[in-house]
Every structure is written in structure tokens, then in C-alpha cells.
């Protein structure tokens, strides 16, 4: 009572201050990811309840929030909402001192935007709140970030959001390939001024006007977007105003950064020592699991048993075992392994780098490496499992083998002696009716006593549990940012096109640009030389790629023979310096054959074959020896009809006579030639 | 009450309450609160309830040994007070009416006369510890009470209801809390006897007890202190700062320089996380290195600790009671991808065998490591092992 009196005496100013300090800290957890990165697993279970090192993902997020002093948590769920609700009610979150966890459901939400509009309509958010996805693992000091946010807001009301980033190297395993984000911040204020999240593009261009406002901008490509945002209530209001906003990152941020009218500002907060990461896709599931096992997330590690319903203890080599694990005979549990209670491992089995849930039965001589095996899985004798994910209740019959990167859904039975090839995804789930998923599921022979269907929707290559080996070298090479040297400009990059065609395209583009923009001959030459080395080609390849472009007439079908000749004469003489650079004595004969091939393909050029040859000779691209040698080869070749040779008889005769004139000693040669 | 307990468990889990001293005090206060607020009919149910709470607290943070110690101390207090009251009432009833209660009183009188061989030994030791007269007197009183009842309490079932019991228990728990509050002072009071002028002392880590100890000595004597920085937590740096602020001649060295510097050191004075029943230590990692170096140079190692850190458990190797922290303390996460095939371990504790330790200075005086088993018998009841069903 005395306290109350004081308050009223203190007047309005202190009153508001008091209210401020008594604000309950709220957080909104998005229980749905609105994507299908984890399918087919998420057909049956929401992503937030998937176990990460045997503890549901949601628990990590909620524990992080609760231990940072958040008092009120709203879990917004859409897909599988009843499962999430049930889980929260049955777990300790329903009755924990100091924090209340409430569920909100929005059945027809399709996007994050819908969810946030749902939160706004519920009118529960009173002040600054934390917006987080239900799959974040972190041990950061949230209070510090909050203080920074609040201090900024005191100064400028327009600061509506602070985004948390974690520093890592660009190729860090925990940095999802999928958010290849480039971020520009004002180096002094840490205000976010540029956000580019388009992994397909290889470059990011910043409008120059940006520098008017911000004299120095720091561009960063080494950050993990933790999806922890400290937001003002205005953020929700903005989502209401712009009913077409779907995603925070895609729409909201771009809009805020792009609009000049409302002077809203976003800021960044970069973590140095602390840990924060989001389980965004299968790859990050794998890497965050590793981070937990290696204890980067301390104190959120299995042996801290923070949910009070586990009994893990740690022994050397990062082996975590719960009480009540049965290991028979000479089974070998090696490094980085987690074993849940009630699990039995038969003799002769080898387990390494794997996480195994509760009540799993593993037979004799089983080999498991780098895999994630959830609860109640049965693995019979002699099975081999490589880097795969096995959901609850899956059964792997004896002598079968599961290739790396596979996903085995809930209660699937892998039959005896079945060998599953790498990256196969098996599920028992029936697709929802209103979705056109049916094509994605295919009947599949699961072997003797097997049960399951194949899921054939391909994941993006960066979203597999482990890296695909096939296209790794080329892929990772070109993904390497800032790797020096000559990089082929990838305008219409298509991995299926063979190297040579790609090279031809590049050369063609270069020459065309050269012709259209009247570039200096030297520059074109340097560029083609660069391509030559990038694609590991020789001079002949270059010439063979250059000539067709040089010779192609824009209106080849209508042009008269005379005009075409004039065109060719002009082109060859003007570009001869370029051609000379790439021609050498060894490749000239082959070049003539290439030209022959070119004329074969393009009817119009057959008539000007001799002209081309002549012009090349005149411009020192081809020597007379080469032409004569070519003629000789054609003559020797009995199958060749000698069509082109006939075309060139004049030229050859002329050449020969010139030769005789200049060199008397070569009489014998010319004699044999004429025979 | 349950909610308060839950909150405390959460605080323990999230390490909002850290440091042996803070944890112990919080535990003792929680238990006192429980005894006074909760309804319990007799000592037996109370003991059961406290045991259950104790187990939950220990499960929350198994490596904060002092939680278990405090719970055991409280359990011991309950038994002790119960027996004392029971004896008093029996004596009273025996004197007033001799007929009805004769068989039981004769039984109890036989126990009081039963031989108590430990008694002279205990008092002798307390005489040895000359400085802390007040507490040692208190202790010898209670311990003699305990010794009287020790032999027979197997067949006492603690089910009788005494109205006086609650107040007596609360009083004793208050004494325990007072003991905790005063222990830094009590340990520091002995400093003059152990640190002499112009000595060089080496210490490591960050221990309030050691800090107070050195500061107290510095009021009368001038000496040098070498502080080991104790990587990766670098707590030694904090200690060095506080000591130099108290105008003690302080030198900070890296962990790797311990052996090289040891030859010029007269005494190593360290704190500890816990004292095991055999006189071994569970202490900050790096302590083992220091202890072995000191042994090699025959430099005495003195451990300053409150009695509440003494626990009736045995560690038999480095891993039994250990914890591993985040590699982030010494590795950069940014570089972690290069370390994928490297294992990194960041143990929090070292186990130091008793033969490396020369002397314990507790709040009730100095003790040899060999003698600690005796103190355990004196402060804990053997029936109160809380960890046994692991």
C-alpha cells in the first residue's frame, strides 16, 4: 500500500517510468515455418516438435526465451496446431514459474504475414516484443540486445526492429546456403541499409543514393541470420497496413528499406561469442546438432538436462548417454554419439557420430554412422545406415542398407536385404487432399515385409542432410565467394550444358559485344584469352568458336551472294589480328577442316568457302603450307567426295604456281601434287 | 512453496545462482522456509520431505556439491534436535514418574552410558584449532550430543511428535546460516598464522575465501602474491585486480609459467569447488597442474575452504565429477568449420588427489587431509546419502 501511495504522489512522470519498468516482456514464437524444407517428415509432425539431439526444437527456443527473462510467450501455430498445443500442455511449459506459455492458432494461415496479422488481431502485444521462429537454438544474452534496442528507441521512435545476426565465415556449416544474405549496415550506427537475400544471383548492386544518407556502409557476407528480431508493436501494425506482406525477410524488410515516406529504421545486432542459429533446413539440422554435441550452445547441452526429463551424462569423446542404456557384448560406441534411455545396442554393432533416441532396439553387427535416429526405432541385425534420418517407429529389417542422405519417415518398414540408394526419401503419410502433392508420392518396392512409399519431390541440393558428392567440386568452387582468378561470367548458367557449348556461348557473346560496341581488338583478345584458360581450351577451339560468329551475316537467308562476299572480306580483314593471335602452325590444317564443317552446317556459306580460305591466307591466318597439306589430306581420303577441294582448285593452283615461282627446289612436291 | 522450490531449481539450472556460497545460502534459506511454512506431523515425515527436495535440487545441478552438503547438514540437525528433545522429555518423565516409563528409560540410559571412543579424540582436535573458539565450542557441544545418540539411533524411528521441535530446528538452521555468513571471516582470522613476512604466495582462480584470507594477512604483514590467470575463464585476472587494489604486491602470470615460477614460491594458497571425503579436491581446471608443480618443488599447498564444501563423496578419476564448457571460450565459432575433425574439451574441474595437499584451513581451524573423514562423520549422518540411487 505504501508503495502505491508513493506512486500517486510522484506525479505523472514517475508514473510512466514505473509502468515502463513493470512491463512484461513478451515473445511471439512462430510455430510454423511456412515452407516444406523438412518434407516428407513434416507431413506428420510440425517442424518445431522434431527432436534435435533428442529434445524437441521448440524446447530450445522456449528455454532460451524463458531463461532470458521473457515472461509471456505466445506460440503461434498453424499446421499441426493441435499437436503443438498438446505438447505444450503436457510438458513442463504449462506450469513453469515466471513464464506463461500460451498457444494461438490460425488455421488458414499460409504465410508469416498471416500469422503476424493474427497476432495483431488477438491484441495481446503491449510493448516491444521478441519475434522468433520456433526452431532457434541460442544461448545469447537477450537482455543486452534488448537494452541496446530500447536505448536506440529512446533516441529515435522510428527504430522499429533490431535483428540479431551471428558472425561466422561465409562457408560455415551452420550458415544455411539458402540464406546467402548480403547485408549492408551503416558502419557507425549499425543501421540496416541494404538487405539482399537472393542466393541465385552472384552479385549485389547498391544504389548510389544510399551513400548520400550513409557515408560509410559496411557490407557483410559472413553473418548467420538468427531470425531473432526485437520488434516494436508498429511492426505488427505495418503488417496489417500492407496485407500483401507474406514474409518478414522478403517483403517487410525490402519495403521498409525501399520506402522513403515512412522513416522507419531497422538495426542489426551482431553476436560475437554467443551462439544463435536456426534449424532452417536439413543441412542446418545436421550442423546445429553438431554444434550442440560440441557444446557451442552451452549451457543448452544434453547433459545439462534443462528440460528436467532427461538424464544425460557426458563421457570423453563427446559420448552422451542417458541412464538405462543397454550395451551388449563388444559393441563399439565411438565419438560424438548420443544414446537415449531404454536403447539397446547388440554385440558387434558400431555406432559413431550418431544421435539415437529413446527405446531404440539395435541388433547385432549393425553399422550406424553419422545418422539421426529418433525414438522407438528398430534396427535388425547386420543393417548398415549411413548419414540418414530415421523418424519415430521406423523399422529397418535385417541385412538392409540405407544410403547416405536418406530420410525414412514415421513407422516406415525397410524390408529385408533392401538396399536403398542414397538420398531416397520414404514416407507412409498420405498427402492432404487439397494439395497437389499426389505426384510427389510414388509406390516403391520396399523389399520383403517392407512398407512405405517414395517421396520424389527433389530437395534443393543445399538442403540435403549431407552434401551430395556428385556435383560438389564444380558447385562448391563456383559458390566460393571472392575466389580470385578468371571466373566465367555466368549469364545463362545451366549445369546440364557441356563445357564446350558453354565456352562457345561465352566466346560468341564476347565477339558480338565486340562487334556491336566497337571494342578494341586487344580487349576482345584479352577476354577470349581469359575464357580460354578458364575452360582449359587451346587456340584451335578459340578459332573454331570465333569464326562462325565473325562470319554470320545478320540476314543470312536473304542476302545476295555478292553482299555476303563483301561482308566476309570486311569481317576477316578487320578481325584478322585477333585470329592471328590464336592460330599457330599446328592448328591451321585442323582449322580448315573446322571451316569445312561450318560450311556443311550452313548451306549459304558453301559457295564462299574458297573466299574464306583465301581471305584467311591473305591475312596470314593460314599459311599456304596448311592449305596444301589440307588439300593433300582430302585427296588421300578416299571417302571424301572432294567437294570443297573442287571449290578451291583455283586457289590451290594459284598457290602452287606462286610457290614454284618463289621456290624452285620444291619441284618434286608440286609434281606429285599435280598427279 | 512448491512454486518457490521450482523457481529455485530453475535458477540453479540456468545458473542464475552461482558460486558455492550463494548456492549454499539460498539452499539453507529455502529449507528453513520449508520447515517453518510447510505442515509436517513428526520428524520422520520432515526428514523424508527434505530428502526428496534435496534429491531434486541435486538433480538440478549435480555438480554444485554444496547443495547436497547443506541438505545433509539440515537433515543431521533435524535428527540431532529430535534426539535432544526426546532425551530431555524422557529424563523429565523419568524423574517425575518412575513406574510407567521404566523400560524405555532404562534403555535410553544404557545408551547414554555406552562407550563413546571418539569423544576424547574430537575434543583434542578442537583444542588444536585454537583460533575459532566460539564456533568450535558450539561444535563440540553439538558433536558431543551427536556422539551420545550416534550408537543407538538405528532403532529410533523419529515418529514422536514434539511441539518444541520446529522452533529448535529453525534455531539450528539459523545457526548454520550464521556459520555460512561468518565463514570468510573465520577462515581469514587464521591468516596471520600461515602467512609470514616477505613470503611469496602463489594462488589461482577466483575464490572469495582466499581473497579475504590474503587481504587479512596483508593488514599485518607484507608479502608477494603471484596469481595464475586460470585460462580459459581468466578468473585469476579478477583476483589479481582485487588484490592489487588492496595494495598487495601482485604479479599475474600465465598458466604455462606455473612450473617455472614455482621454485621461488613459499606457499601455494588456493580455494576449491568441493572437498571430497578422502581429502581430495574438485577445483577449477588448472589446479592439478599447480598442485603437481608444487609437489615437485616441495612447496606446501594450503586449501582455504568453508566446511560446507566438504562432501561425503569420492572421486576416483578426473572424469567422475566433471563438467565440460563451451569450446567458444577459447575457439572462434567463425573458424569452427576448420575444426570439424578436431575434438576440443573444456573441462571445468580438476580432481586433485589428497597426497598433493598439505593443509586445509576451514572455518573451524586447520586440518590434515587424512583427518577429513572424521569431520564427515561429525557433520553428516551416514543414512543421508542422497546420491546413492544413481
Image (tube, grey):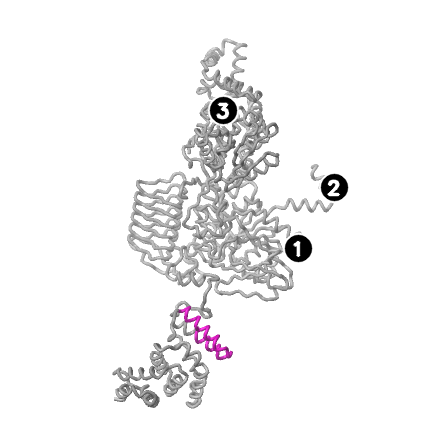
Asked if disc 3 and disc 2 are in contact, CB closer than 8 Å, the reply is: no
* Label 1, label 3: how far apart the Cα atoms are: 63 Å
Q: Nearer the viewer, residue B130 or A46?
A: B130
Q: Secondary structure at mark 2?
A: helix
Instruction: Give the quarter of the figure containing the N terminus of chain A.
Output: top right
The residue identified by callout 1 is A156
Q: Is residue B123 left or right of residue A595?
A: right
Q: Secondary structure at mark 3?
A: strand
Q: Position of residue A332 (x, y in %)?
A: 33, 43
Q: Secondary structure at mark 1?
A: loop
Can residue B56 be seen here? The reply is: no
- Which chain hosts label 2? A
The correct choice, above or below, for A532 with respect to A561 in the image is above
Quarter of image, res A456: bottom left
* Label 3, label 2: how far apart the Cα atoms are: 60 Å
Instruction: Give the quarter of the figure containing the C terminus of chain A.
Output: bottom left
The residue identified by callout 2 is A9
Q: Nearer the viewer, residue B226 or B111?
A: B226
The answer to whether dots 2 and 1 both sit on one chain is yes
Q: Is residue A194 left or right of residue A155?
A: left
The residue identified by callout 3 is B367
Q: Nearer the viewer, residue B36 or A635?
A: A635
Q: Position of residue B260 (x, y in %)?
A: 48, 37
- Which chain hosts label 3? B
Query: Crowding at label 3, few (<14), some or many (≥20) Cα neighbours within 10 Å?
Result: some
Instruction: Look at the image and give the residue range highlighted in magenta.
Output: A506-535
Mark whose residue sits in front, 3 or 2: 3
Q: Position of residue A564 (x, y in %)?
A: 43, 87
Most prominent secondary structure in the magenta stretch? helix
Q: Position of residue A665 (x, y in %)?
A: 29, 86
The correct choice, above or below, for A106 with respect to B244 in the image is below
Amino acid at each position: 500500500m505504501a508503495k502505491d501511495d508513493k506512486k500517486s504522489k510522484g506525479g505523472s512522470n514517475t508514473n510512466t517510468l514505473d509502468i515502463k519498468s513493470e512491463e512484461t516482456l513478451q515473445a511471439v514464437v512462430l510455430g510454423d515455418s511456412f515452407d516444406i524444407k523438412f518434407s516428407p517428415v513434416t507431413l506428420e509432425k510440425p517442424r518445431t516438435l522434431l527432436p534435435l539431439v533428442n529434445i524437441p526444437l521448440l524446447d530450445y527456443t522456449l528455454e532460451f526465451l524463458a531463461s532470458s527473462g521473457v515472461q509471456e510467450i505466445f506460440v503461434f501455430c498453424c499446421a499441426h496446431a493441435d499437436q503443438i498445443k498438446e505438447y505444450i500442455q503436457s510438458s513442463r511449459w504449462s506450469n513453469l514459474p515466471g513464464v506463461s506459455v500460451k498457444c494461438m492458432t490460425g488455421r488458414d494461415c499460409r504465410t508469416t504475414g498471416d500469422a503476424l496479422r493474427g497476432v495483431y488481431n488477438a491484441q495481446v502485444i503491449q510493448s516491444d516484443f521478441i519475434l522468433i521462429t520456433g526452431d532457434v537454438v541460442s544461448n545469447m544474452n537477450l537482455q543486452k540486445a534488448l537494452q541496446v534496442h530500447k536505448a536506440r528507441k529512446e533516441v529515435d521512435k522510428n527504430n522499429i526492429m533490431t535483428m540479431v545476426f551471428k558472425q561466422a565465415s561465409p562457408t560455415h556449416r551452420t550458415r544455411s546456403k539458402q540464406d546467402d544474405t548480403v547485408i549492408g549496415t551503416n558502419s557507425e550506427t549499425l543501421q540496416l541499409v541494404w538487405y539482399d537475400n537472393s542466393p541465385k544471383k552472384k552479385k549485389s548492386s547498391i544504389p548510389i543514393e544510399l551513400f548520400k544518407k550513409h557515408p560509410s556502409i559496411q557490407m557483410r557476407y559472413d553473418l548467420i541470420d538468427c531470425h531473432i528480431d526485437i520488434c516494436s508493436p508498429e511492426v505488427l501494425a505495418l503488417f496489417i497496413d500492407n496485407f500483401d506482406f507474406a514474409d518478414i525477410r522478403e517483403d517487410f524488410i525490402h519495403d521498409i528499406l525501399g520506402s522513403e515516406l515512412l522513416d522507419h529504421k531497422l538495426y542489426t545486432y551482431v553476436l560475437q561469442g554467443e551462439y544463435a542459429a536456426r534449424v532452417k533446413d536439413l543441412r542446418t539440422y545436421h550442423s546445429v546438432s553438431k554444434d550442440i554435441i560440441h557444446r557451442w550452445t552451452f549451457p543448452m547441452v544434453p547433459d545439462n538436462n534443462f528440460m528436467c526429463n532427461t538424464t544425460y551424462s557426458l563421457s570423453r569423446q563427446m559420448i552422451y548417454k542417458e541412464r538405462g542404456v543397454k550395451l551388449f557384448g563388444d559393441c563399439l560406441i565411438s565419438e560424438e554419439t548420443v544414446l537415449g534411455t531404454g536403447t539397446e545396442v547388440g554385440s558387434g554393432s558400431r555406432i559413431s557420430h550418431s544421435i539415437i533416441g529413446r527405446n531404440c532396439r539395435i541388433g547385432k553387427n549393425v553399422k550406424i554412422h553419422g545418422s539421426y535416429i529418433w525414438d522407438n526405432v528398430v534396427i535388425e541385425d547386420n543393417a548398415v545406415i549411413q548419414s540418414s534420418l530415421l523418424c519415430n517407429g521406423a523399422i529397418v529389417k535385417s541385412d538392409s542398407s540405407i544410403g547416405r542422405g536418406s530420410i525414412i519417415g514415421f513407422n516406415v518398414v525397410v524390408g529385408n536385404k533392401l538396399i536403398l540408394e542414397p538420398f531416397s526419401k520414404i514416407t507412409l503419410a498420405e498427402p492432404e487432399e487439397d494439395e497437389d502433392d499426389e505426384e510427389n508420392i510414388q509406390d516403391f518396392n520396399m523389399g520383403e515385409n517392407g512398407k512405405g512409399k517414395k517421396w520424389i519431390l527433389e530437395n534443393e541440393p543445399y538442403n540435403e542432410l549431407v552434401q551430395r558428392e556428385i556435383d560438389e567440386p564444380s558447385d562448391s568452387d563456383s559458390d566460393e565467394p571472392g575466389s580470385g582468378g578468371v571466373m566465367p561470367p555466368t549469364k545463362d548458367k545451366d549445369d546440364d550444358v557441356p563445357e564446350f557449348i558453354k565456352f562457345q556461348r561465352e566466346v560468341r557473346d564476347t565477339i558480338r559485344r565486340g562487334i556491336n560496341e566497337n571494342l578494341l581488338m586487344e580487349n576482345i583478345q584479352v577476354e577470349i584469352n581469359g575464357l580460354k584458360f578458364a575452360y582449359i581450351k587451346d587456340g584451335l577451339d578459340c578459332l573454331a568458336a570465333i569464326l562462325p560468329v565473325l562470319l554470320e551475316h545478320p540476314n543470312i537467308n536473304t542476302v545476295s551472294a555478292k553482299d555476303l562476299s563483301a561482308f566476309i572480306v570486311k569481317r576477316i580483314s578487320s578481325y584478322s589480328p585477333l585470329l592471328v593471335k590464336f592460330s599457330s602452325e599446328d592448328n591451321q590444317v585442323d582449322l580448315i577442316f573446322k571451316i569445312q564443317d561450318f560450311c556443311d552446317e550452313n548451306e549459304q556459306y558453301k559457295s564462299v568457302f574458297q573466299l574464306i580460305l583465301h581471305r584467311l591466307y591473305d591475312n596470314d591466318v593460314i599459311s599456304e603450307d596448311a592449305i596444301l597439306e589440307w588439300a593433300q589430306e582430302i585427296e588421300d581420303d578416299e571417302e571424301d567426295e572432294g567437294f570443297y577441294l573442287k571449290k578451291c582448285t583455283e586457289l590451290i593452283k594459284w598457290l602452287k604456281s606462286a610457290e614454284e615461282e618463289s621456290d624452285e627446289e620444291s619441284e618434286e612436291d608440286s609434281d606429285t601434287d599435280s598427279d | 512453496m512448491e512454486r518457490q522450490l521450482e523457481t529455485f531449481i530453475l535458477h540453479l539450472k540456468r545458473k542464475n545462482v552461482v558460486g558455492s556460497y550463494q548456492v549454499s545460502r539460498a539452499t539453507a534459506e529455502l529449507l528453513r522456509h520449508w520447515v517453518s511454512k510447510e505442515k509436517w506431523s513428526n520428524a520422520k515425515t520432515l526428514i523424508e520431505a527434505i530428502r526428496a527436495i534435496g534429491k531434486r535440487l541435486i538433480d538440478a545441478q549435480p555438480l554444485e556439491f554444496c547443495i547436497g552438503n547443506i541438505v545433509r547438514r539440515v537433515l543431521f540437525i533435524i535428527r540431532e534436535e529430535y534426539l535432544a528433545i526426546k532425551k530431555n522429555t524422557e529424563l523429565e518423565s523419568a524423574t517425575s514418574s518412575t513406574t510407567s516409563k521404566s523400560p524405555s528409560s532404562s534403555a535410553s540410559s544404557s545408551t547414554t552410558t555406552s562407550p563413546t571412543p571418539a569423544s576424547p579424540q574430537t575434543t583434542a582436535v578442537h583444542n588444536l584449532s585454537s583460533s575459532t573458539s566460539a564456533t568450535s565450542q558450539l561444535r563440540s557441544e553439538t558433536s558431543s550430543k551427536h556422539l551420545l545418540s550416534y550408537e543407538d539411533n538405528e532403532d529410533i524411528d523419529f515418529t514422536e511428535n514434539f511441539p518444541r521441535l520446529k522452533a529448535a530446528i529453525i534455531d539450528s538452521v539459523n545457526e548454520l546460516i550464521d556459520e555460512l555468513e561468518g565463514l570468510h571471516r573465520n577462515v581469514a582470522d587464521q591468516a596471520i598464522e600461515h602467512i609470514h613476512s616477505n613470503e611469496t604466495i602463489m594462488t589461482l582462480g577466483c575464490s572469495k575465501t582466499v581473497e579475504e584470507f590474503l587481504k587479512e594477512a596483508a593488514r599485518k604483514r607484507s608479502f608477494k602474491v603471484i596469481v595464475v590467470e586460470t585460462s580459459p575463464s581468466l578468473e585469476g585476472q579478477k583476483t589479481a585486480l582485487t588484490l592489487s587494489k588492496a595494495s598487495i604486491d601482485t604479479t599475474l602470470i600465465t598458466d604455462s609459467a606455473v612450473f617455472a615460477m614455482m621454485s621461488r614460491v613459499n606457499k601455494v594458497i588456493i580455494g576449491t569447488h568441493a572437498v571430497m571425503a578422502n581429502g581430495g579436491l574438485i577445483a577449477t581446471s588448472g589446479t592439478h597442474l599447480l598442485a603437481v608443480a608444487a609437489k615437485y618443488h616441495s612447496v606446501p599447498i594450503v586449501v582455504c575452504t568453508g566446511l560446507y564444501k566438504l562432501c561425503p563423496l569420492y572421486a576416483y578419476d578426473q572424469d567422475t565429477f566433471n563438467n565440460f564448457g563451451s569450446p567458444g571460450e577459447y575457439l572462434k565459432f567463425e573458424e569452427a568449420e576448420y575444426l570439424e575433425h578436431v575434438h576440443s574439451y573444456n573441462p571445468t574441474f580438476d580432481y586433485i588427489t589428497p597426497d598433493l595437499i598439505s593443509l586445509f584451513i576451514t572455518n573451524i581451524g586447520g586440518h590434515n587431509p587424512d583427518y577429513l573423514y572424521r569431520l564427515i562423520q561429525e557433520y553428516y549422518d551416514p543414512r543421508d546419502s542422497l546420491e546413492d540411487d544413481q
